Image (cartoon, rainbow, N blue to C red):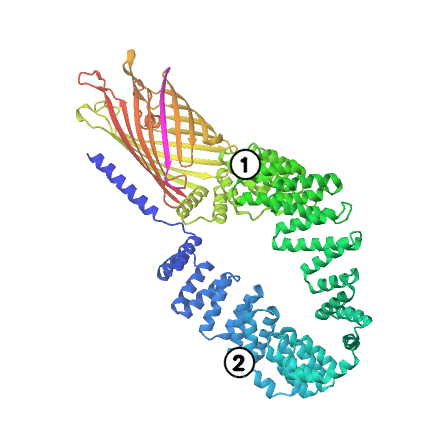
Amino acid sequence: MKVKYIFILLTILFISSSTICAQEIPHTPRYYIHRAEGYVSSNAWNTAKREIDAGLKEYPDDPDLRYLNGRYYFIIGDMKEARYNLVRATQINDLHFKAKRLLVDVEDKLQHYSSAICYINELLEFQPYDRDLWRRKIAFYRMLKNDVEADAALKRLHHIYPNDSVVLADVRRHNHENWDKVLKKSSLNEAAENLERWIDQDPMMREYYVELVGTYIKMGEYEKAIGAANRGLVHFPNDAELINKVVGIMTELGLYTQALAFAKSKNMSGNVYNNLLQEVAADARMHDPYEANGRLYLATHDRDALTYLINTSLTRGYYDDARFYIEEGMKLEGRTPGLLMKLYSLEKQSGNEKRCLRVLTELYEKNPEDEELLEAYADMMLQLSDYDFAAEQWNDAYEHLNRVLELMPDTDDSWPAVVSKQITVLGHLNRQEEAHNLFVESSERSPHNRRRFASAYEDFAGNRLKFLIDEERYDEALNEAQALLEVVPGSEVALRCLINMSQTLKRDDLFPQYAAMGYEAYPEVPYFVVKQALSLQQQGKNEEALAMLQPRDRSGEFMSPQLVAAYSGISHEWATQLLKNRMSELAMQVIDSALVHDASNKDLLYDKGIAYEYLKQFDKACEYQQRYYEPSNAEQWDYIRHIRYLGFKGFKNRVDATYTSAFYDSHAETLSSIAHLYSIASVSYARISPRNTYTGQISYKGIDGDPLEKESGGFGLEFMAQWEHEFNSKWSGMANAAVSTRFFNKFGLNVSASYSAPRGWTPSLRLGFRRTPSTYLYLGGDNFGLVAKDEFNLLLISPSVEKSWERIKVTANTDVTLLSSNLYYNIGLKGKLFVNNDNISSVSLITGFGSFPELSFFEQTALRNVSHTNAMVGFDVQYLCTRHICLGLTGSWNTCFNPYRLQDGSLSDSYRNIYSIALQFHLAF
């Protein structure tokens, strides 16, 4: 009963220590910062402060923690402490811009404006175009009454952001504050200079132009006044005040003609304009021939006067007059070709397309042989078709283009363009058969323009394919793209669609075919290069795929970002597959090759961290995985556990301590000699290098005596040395040797080799030799009885195989033992479940049976029976507490043949249950 209580107590202590360890958090600055920022985002500053203080206790010189501490004090209003922590952060990291920005706010609160300006100047060295920093700097100069520096800074800011609305508002506000000083308390010359400068700064302030014009008028500088007004009218073209000032100055100078022209250009009206008209109207009428001929025609209907009036009204753009006089001519002469041409010219100039077309049609019908009219008529049809295109009136466009094709010979330079437009129109009308026939017919009539017609055919077919894809009618899109490729061999539009649809529909039978066709037709187009590379990748030809994407110019640089992205993507997927197949060295070569061209690719850099982990370079694995992977909130805990595991495995020194205690079903009157209660304590030290691990271990064993067997108890020591070596990423080996004083094997030797095969398989083979301590040996069968006490040689061969999945590992092994010229066996099975993402924390179940006991149990107990079937079940629990500490608990229940002596000296055939429990402590540093 005492032993059972001890066992229960040890179990409770183990579980408690595991819970305490589980609560520890990796002591890294990033961890504290991440937790503190999480609380800050929810405005839980007091909780955040506890995380910050915990971090500063371990990392007092971390600038980010100092910044967060300063930010906390700023929030609660303790500017002195805030300033101290923020200054400390900038002393540690002079480029901590967040800290410097917050220092500006602190100095502002403390009214230390000069200090705030100093920090702003430091920030502007690296962020010279930060508008808000400049504005704060100007404001601080104003606070210090230093208007000279403030004005200079404002001028500089306006130069940087000439069109920024906020900056312009600052300039206007400053100018408004100085308005009276500039305009009323300075000379006219100074006022003009300041207004000119203000206009340069802010050309959209109308008041500046009005004041500047008035100032120049007061100075007698009329030309400058007109120039200033015209500058204002560029931005304010309908400003009545500026227009009236220009007209007034010109009138004052007697420039009536110029004034009238200016007034007309500005659509001027009102009294000023009416007075101006009255002054020039009489003279204009007296000297204008057009007015004189008009009066003559009205009086005499003179035909020469009418001809002059028609030509002059058209020239001057008097369209109403021209229409009136042309109609007068047709009344006198009829609709002659000459007058129809005049009418056509009028309708064309006035932009009346329908009337223009009617007149032109009439002209063409009267003179069908006139090439000029034919060309003009065709041009009109084409122009109308352009309008139809813009309005998407496809039926009208078809009619107009069809009329052009009827009139225009195929030798005309414009004929290919018209055909191409008609193909496009038929495509919009979904008249695909007609478009196809027009394409074929036109290609036969003009073979050298086939590529041009094909381009138009591709355009309409491409629009059709895009419509089908948008509607998710992928099968139809695939079929129509195949038809397009037959009509236009090598069509880029068709090939792109066929490749995309093959991927979308997962047609692995078509994708390689079309990818190869696209690459053959367009070997320099990145899209087709990438798709061919992906096709080769799907066929398992990763090396060929990457070779296609290598630098394609003499400078050694990629010609397209698409090639870089594809090279990185294929390298990432291939490396991932290689790592799954445990080909980590080749995976590392693939990753490094891709990083040459894409050095900042986080996926590749993280892959490199995984490769380092497979290569058992855990320190580098930890560095890369921690730096280049950003876990989601759901992944955060697993990520921390895995980084903790890499840190644990990355240490070069390891100390392991184990305490094992065994006991049996106690029946005092029938105690067996093989059922001794024993305890074993072991301590080992290992030195770990990239490929070699050297271990030394000392074990102490205490065992009770057995009065029935007349054996005394006592203790023994065992000394063991071990060497493990990684030959490469697949092969590894181990050799160890042990000697002891008593109760252990007098001498032991083991060598083993393992091979990491693809798909998570790991076969292993172990060979061993043991020299047992002096002991009795019970045999069964015909030899049942006790063999004389002696030392025995034991030879061992132990093949095993292991299969790993993501979080499950299963191991099967067989121990074949040669002892006293007899062969024995034991078959074992172990299943392990990793409960965390750290490859250490796990729960394992173990079982085994055979004519020979499980090997470690035999070595610990010196079990003397090897003839009957023995069986065992057990468990193993491991938990990684911190980056330095791991705890373990192992238990077993062995049921073995256990003969014991009766009072008459004979042997009894009996089985016993033997239990063992082991506590483990692992320290890495």
Determine if the magenta segment contains residue 713. Answer: no
The residue nearer to you, when weighing 451 against 394, is 394
Horizontal side of residue 801 vs 155, given as left or right: left
Span colored in magenta: 821-836
Horizontal side of residue 376 vs 913, given as left or right: right
Q: Which amino acid type is marked by label 1?
A: Glu
If the image is split into quadrants, where does the N terminus sit?
A: top left
Kindly identify which numbered label has been placed on residue 312.
none
**Image spot of residue 852 (x, y percent):** 33, 21
Q: CA distance from mark 2 to mark 1?
A: 69 Å
The residue nearer to you, when weighing 126 against 514, is 514
- The residue positioned 65% from the left and 85% from the top of the image is 215
Kindly identify which numbered label has been placed on residue 145.
2
Q: Which amino acid type is marked by label 2?
A: Lys
The residue nearer to you, when weighing 193 against 465, is 465
Q: Is residue 779 visible?
A: yes
| Residue 203: quadrant of the picture | bottom right
- Could you classify mark 1 by the number of other residues whose Cα lies within 10 Å: few (under 14), some (14-19), or many (20 or more)? some
Mark 1 secondary-structure assignment: helix
> Which is nearer the N-term, disc 2 or disc 1?
2
Type of secondary structure dominating the magenta stretch: strand
The residue nearer to you, when weighing 157 against 301, is 301
**Image spot of residue 603 (x, y percent):** 52, 45
| Residue 266: quadrant of the picture | bottom right
Determine if the magenta segment contains residue 833. Answer: yes
State the residue position of label 1: 585
Q: Is residue 595 visible?
A: no
Mark 2 secondary-structure assignment: loop
